Image: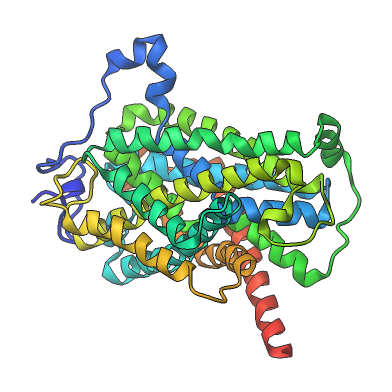
Amino acid sequence: MTTGRSGGAPGSRLELDAPRGEVPPTEVRAADWRRRWWVLVAVLGPGVLAMVGENDGPSMISYAATGRAYGVGLFLPFILVTFAVAGVCQEMCMRVGAVTRRGFGELVYQRYGRLWGAMAAGDLVVSNFVTLVAEFIALRVGLGYFGVGAPVSVLLGSGLVVAGSAGQRYRRWERRALVLAVFNLLFVAAAVAAGSTLEDLGRSFATTSPLGSPKGQLLLLVASTIGATVTPWMVFFQQSAVVDKGFGRADIGRGRLDLAIGAAVAAVCAGGAYLAAAASRGGTGPIADLVAPVARPLFALGLVEAGGLAILTISASGAYAVGECLGVPHSFDAPMRRARLFYGTDLVVPVLAGVVSVLPGLPLLEVVIDANVLATVLLPVTLVFLVLLANDRYLMAEAANSPRANLLAATVVVLVIVAGSAAAIQGLLSAVRT
């Protein structure tokens, strides 16, 4: 019996060395890594796309909203800490994917049964759909700055997913996504245009003044900031993409380099979004007015890139999860005729989210921030399974978590649970008061 990217019965015995069916992975040849000119290009992939993809529309708007509310201060170093937290999580899922050659959803089903697998996948489905709605809102806001209407924005976002999966090859999909990811640097340009300086950056790390804000708003922004950097879809996406790319046990070091580059770039760009708004603290108006007028075109273009890349990666994570949990082909290398459910999920779900995003009366800013909070609330289930898989000696052998890695992982899980619980309790209390 074969499992893997070609599909297999959920709950079946895990055979790590079993044939991988009719859809072979993209093999990474050792000779390619020895060619210095291509080393960096060959390394870039799932790690960069997971980390930069998480600099999505809701995240960048959340960073900007925080920067506008607090100015240059303690929140900027906190954002960088959350990227370190994301790196801990993503290193585990990269390592598990490279060793087992199986996606996250598939492993949860096979190791812990249908019920727990359904819970992990259910978390993803709920958070993915809400987040995709928020991505289309970000795309709509960014394009709206240039006079493009909401229906056209939805069509463009949906067309991006179609163009991304055209060609039925993972490498082609990855390259197109990586080209789009480069434009996340627009947020750094927006910060420079808004008047942010290296002195502002240094002051944010030197300040020790407390954050003056109502506790409810502070908890919401803390949870939103965590949810902007660590989400369930990242775990599903990176582990499955690592498998689709063809990474194996020997590629763990390259996977870590890919992830480190992605985390560094994403942290710099997130800081750019924060500083762009912090430089114009106290502004009011719609989302596009979070930053000074001179920086708005760059920020708007950045939102288009952020929303577009996230639509690609989040849709892919959902398609991977559905295929893995149902035991059907789930790879961009699979022919469409054999992976109809995979490609159908990848294309249909974002279209439905796009339709919801243009419903009249939708509170734009609330949706994009609440999407991040929801990710924080739903994340613990995914993280617990990830830690269990990374410690599974049957799966991982000597590549299992070390005591130091477990200490870092436990710290991350506790941080996320506390932040998510605090935000949920605060939201419940606010609802009761009203």
Pick the front one: 254 or 400: 254
Residue at left offset 58%, top offset 68%? 367
Q: Residue 330's spot in the image, x, y percent?
A: 22, 51
Locate residue 17 relative to residue 380 in the image: left or right. left
- What percent of the width, then of the height, locates residue 336? 15, 49
- State the residue at coordinates (35%, 11%): 34
Q: Position of residue 279 (x, y in %)?
A: 82, 44
> Does residue 337 sit above or below 433 in this rendering?
above
**Residue at position x 70%, y 52% from top?**
64
For the question of whether residue 88 can be seen, the reply is no
Q: Which quadrant of the view contains residue 241?
A: top left
Q: Residue at x 71, y 82 (%)?
A: 430
Question: Of residues 335 and 391, which is closer to you in this image?
Answer: 335
Quadrant showing the C terminus = bottom right
Count of numbered circles in the view: 0
Q: Is residue 95 above or below residue 63?
A: above
In the image, taking residue 412 as reference, residue 320 lies left or right, namely left
Q: Nearer the viewer, residue 105 or 132?
A: 132
Which color scheme does this rendered protein use?
A: rainbow
